[in-house]
Amino acid sequence: ENTEQQARFDQTIAADISIEPRDWMPEAYRKTLIRQIGQHAHSEVVGMLPEGNWITRAPTLRRKAVLLAKVQDEAGHALYLYSAAETLGADRDDMVEKLIDGKMKYSSIFNYPTLSWADVPAIGWLVDGAAIVNQVALCRASYGPYARAMVRVCKEESFHQRQGFEAMMALANGTEEQKKMAQDAVNRFWWPVLTMFGPSDDNSPNSAQSTAWKIKRFSNDELRQKFVDSTVPQVEALGLTVPDPDLKWNEQTGHYEFGEINWDEFYAVVAGQGPCNHERLAARRKAWEEGRWVREAASAYAARRQQAA
Ligand code: FAQ
């Protein structure tokens, strides 16, 4: 029976037909999806913190309204993603507890601080820009609920990316001081953003299996290259520079060549030693604890209604 189910699963993947929650799937496929979708959901939640830091200090009412909407969108993305993980049998409370106990990961990028207002446009433009490159590929991931969540998420991320670029343009075309803030934000975010795509292909333990299962459609390095190729001209259009002395256009390949990423820093940040890891998890733990009474009240209410029915 199991080999027959495995054969049917393999055929479904080979035919590019999506796997749905009711379908039989190998345990390892389920596990890797819960890992990736769970990490992705946690990234959306923790990702609200760096930008949330500037909501009370946005420079104008319009920027504040846009930023509030953007941060709320990220909460929405987390909800779609936690729901997608639940269709695989994952338990949401369990996932959140693993996050705050440091047993589940979230994107390294959110462990960097937002030191000036220019970091808000830099995140919208560069971080959401990188997220789109990765998530457009995931719209074709083999697991149906994940792929479908990505379609809507990508539409919202494109709005985020454009608002980030537009806000960055205002700074880049502003006073000398504003231009300096813009360049400083690009200098600090450029390299960490490149690590959002994960380790290089020869150091990516999950890639081979996730590619065979068609969860991954492009490799980490391919997506990173795509991001660099599309973003460098945008940096130049703003009159800013990329903080990479080795960056150069290669006429033959039609791609930019770029310098060596500091992988030691990446692994240290993933291991919990980034500038804000402690602060981020402390904020999530506090929210989880302070929200306990709401969760308990909602569960008690639901149980009572069920009893009455
Ligand atoms: N940070 O073997 P691989 C957003 C881990 S966008 C931390 O290559 P895989 C939007 C990896 O999990 C950000 N950990 O792994 C937003 C694995 O560890 P494990 C979220 C990282 O899965 C914008 C190990 O290293 N997007 O939130 C990172 O095949 C603004 C080995 O790596 C997603 O999560 C990293 N950067 O490929 C929100 C996209 N990179 O689990 C708010 C979905 C790797 O074995 C504001 N995820 N690791 O212990 C993916 O596409 C994949 O999981 C990759 C990694 C490409 C990230």
Image (cartoon, rainbow, N blue to C red):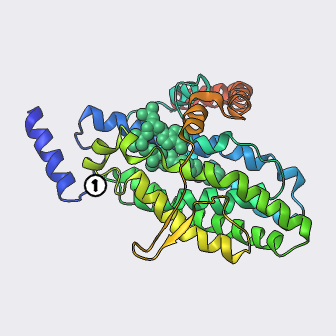
**Residue 82 seen in render:** no
Q: Is residue 92 left or right of residue 117?
A: left
Residue beneath disc 1: 18
**Residue 12 position (above or below residue 32):** below
**Residue 117 position (above or below residue 263):** below
User: Which residue shows up at 18% across the image and 59% down it?
Assistant: 15
Residue 61 place in picture, x, y as percent: 88, 64
Mark 1 Cβ and ligand 1 under 8 Å apart: no
User: Which residue shows up at 65% across the image and 43% down it?
Assistant: 110
Q: Is residue 83 left or right of residue 183?
A: left
| Number of callouts | 1
Q: Nearer the viewer, residue 259 or 38?
A: 259
Q: Is residue 25 left or right of residue 196?
A: left
Residue 70, quarter of the rendered image: bottom right
Q: Nearer the viewer, residue 86 or 58?
A: 58
Residue 254 place in picture, x, y as percent: 43, 74
Farthest top residue? Answer: 101
User: Which residue shows up at 52% across the image and 63% down it?
Assistant: 227
User: Which residue shows up at 86% across the image and 58% down it?
Assistant: 58
Residue 259 place in picture, x, y as percent: 55, 55
**Residue type beneath disc 1:** Ser
Farthest front residue? Answer: 246
User: Please, what secondary structure does the residue beneath circle 1 have?
Assistant: loop
Q: Nearer the viewer, residue 104 or 77?
A: 104
At label 1, counting other C-alpha atoms closer than 10 Å, the crowd grade (few under 14, some 14-19, many 20 or more) is: some
**Residue 122 position (above or below residue 200):** below
**Residue 50 seen in render:** yes
Residue 243 place in picture, x, y as percent: 67, 58
Image quadrant containing the N terminus? top left
